[in-house]
Image (cartoon, rainbow, N blue to C red):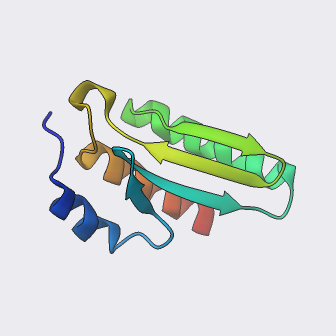
Amino acid sequence: MKPLEEKEILSQLEKLEGWSYNENAIHTTLEFENFKDAFSAMTRIAFEAEAQQHHPNWFNVYNTLEISLSTHDADGVTDKDFKLAHTIESIVSA
């Protein structure tokens, strides 16, 4: 799988509010009501990530979840990252 060009990445990011591109990955920070809600979202995301065989780099403290997506095999951002990002958005907006 070939990484996307920066122009393609920036174009696709226009469809993802709150996501940015830097350090060869796309990133977002999500804030929840409390730790239980953050962990619940992480669990739902984990099941979807496993189904897509594409796993996020993430960091959680209390009610905040930071997510970075990059396709390590391609050494950059690919369509797989955007597919998972859209899945994450659908999970947290539900």
Residue lying farthest to the front in this orientation: 23
Percent x, y of residue 43: 67, 40
**Horizontal relation, residue 9 to residue 83: left or right:** left
Q: Quadrant of the N terminus?
A: top left
Q: Height in image: 85 above or below 23?
A: below
Q: Residue at x 84, y 48 (%)?
A: 62
Q: Height in image: 34 above or below 48?
A: below
Q: Is residue 47 visible?
A: yes
Percent x, y of residue 91: 57, 58
Q: Judge by depth and name the residue closer to the eye, 85 or 24.
A: 24
Q: Judge by depth and name the residue closer to the eye, 53 or 9.
A: 9
Q: Height in image: 16 above or below 73?
A: below
Percent x, y of residue 40: 74, 47
Quarter assignment of residue 92: bottom right
Q: Residue at x 39, y 45 (%)?
A: 23
Q: Quadrant of the C terminus?
A: bottom right
Q: Residue at x 40, y 48 (%)?
A: 84
Q: Is residue 94 visible?
A: no
Percent x, y of residue 45: 57, 44
Q: Residue at x 66, y 40 (%)?
A: 59
**Horizontal relation, residue 26 to residue 31: left or right:** left
